[in-house]
Amino acid sequence: MSDIPNDDGTHGDGTRPNGKRRKLVAGVLAVFLVGGIAYGAWYMLVGSKQEFTDNAYVDGNVVLITPQVAGTVIAIGADNTDAVKAGQVLVQLDPADATVALEGAEANLAKTVRQVRNLFATSSGQQANVKQRESDVARAREDLERREKLASTGAVSGEEMNHARDALAAAQAALTAAREQANANRALVDQTTVQDHPDVRAAAAKVREAYLAYTRTRIVAPVSGIVSKRSTQLGQRVNPGAPLMAVIPVDQMWVNANFKEPQLANIHIGQPVKLTADVYGGKVEYDGKVVGLDAGTGAAFSMLPAQNATGNWIKVVQRVPVRVAIDAAQMREHPLRIGLSMEATVDIHDKSGAVIATAPRSAPAYTTPVFDTDRHDAQQLIDRIVRTNTNGAAAVISTQRLAGSKPGAGFHPASFTIRASH
């Protein structure tokens, strides 16, 4: 039979039984060899110049919206997933009590300005009184001197001389009293004006305090972003500091990439990073930059840090969060959300950057100007009250007349606002 090998180990057709197998094994070895060479070349040229992790997540600011004054919620201006602009009214508290307090503070300031004006007028009157008393003293002295000249001739009696001396003493006493009174009044207004008088400034501080409490019944968004975590309800009585909702600034996000300890030696601030998000897959790639490395591992900052002083200790490779900034234009084109999974590849060619921040910031990391107008408007209101009551003009100053001070101006409640049915 042809399948029975010959004495030299070949088949009847002369071929050896392991020829095909040897060719197959040689082909497989060649493939592995080429693959190994290709991988070695890739690692030498590319892989050794990168650090990769898929343990990375999107992070960002969560701006809690909290009231600064107590009050009852009467309107809600935004709901979860709504986009809001900085300065937009999110929650309106009942302003009735704050309005009454502000009107009382305005009236007290106006009254104080008029009282201080009276102090200035009284001080001027006291100076005139001093001049009159000085004139009385001069006249009484002249009368006494004239009578003393006539006393030697016997034309003036001793009794009349005594009356003249008493009149001079009384005029001098009245002058002393007038001067003391003038000094006392001058001490109340000296080195100041109506606007800068301590009483006026104290009353103005009360107006400023009441006005700020009044405007704070309008709870506004400090930043632009997306509303999340709304917990407040209509009719709810809220206290200062209670979280009502949160605003997520979608343009202020970054990635926390958690790299293993052996990878940290190659990571430096300023190195470029390529990022991909699971939500978009590999079709969308973000450009990033290492902006900082955390000062400790994730385990060290956890709520319950690991306690390794035990007999069954097992070493675990730790990870350190590396903060990566994302290109803002790319993030606007492909928005991200806090908590999304990311993959980060750091280009470690350039190792000239620092491994940890060494210099403090020269400016605040985040600021908001939306509350500056409240202080400006409060000062504007105070100036108008002082000016009106100083000049004596008849004018009505109220919170409703001050432009932009009325709560609810430009306020649009959310569509779910409950309305009473009839």
Image (cartoon, rainbow, N blue to C red):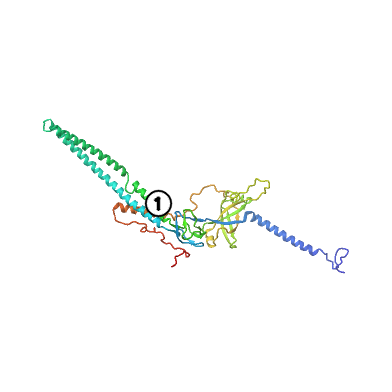
Q: Choose between 32 and 211: the one closer to the eye.
A: 211
Q: Choose between 59 and 89: the one closer to the eye.
A: 89
Q: Quarter of the image containing the N terminus?
A: bottom right
Q: Is residue 119 left or right of residue 149?
A: right
Question: Can the viewer see residue 87 in this picture?
Answer: no
Vertical side of 28 occupied by 182: above or below: above
Residue 271, percent from left and from top: 57, 53
Q: Is residue 272 left or right of residue 104?
A: right
Vertical side of 233 occupied by 267: above or below: above
At horizontal 36% and vertical 49% (from top left) the residue drawn is 203
Q: Amino acid at mark 1?
A: Glu
Residue 96, percent from left and from top: 40, 57
Residue 107, percent from left and from top: 34, 53
At label 1, counting other C-alpha atoms closer than 10 Å, the crowd grade (few under 14, some 14-19, many 20 or more) is some
Q: Choose between 180 and 261: the one closer to the eye.
A: 180
Q: Is residue 350 left or right of residue 247?
A: right
Residue 310, percent from left and from top: 66, 46
View extreme (front): residue: 422
Question: Can the viewer see residue 131 in this picture?
Answer: yes
Count of labels shown?
A: 1
Q: Quarter of the image containing the C terminus?
A: bottom left
Q: Secondary structure at mark 1?
A: helix
Which residue does the numbered mark 1 point to in the structure image? 209
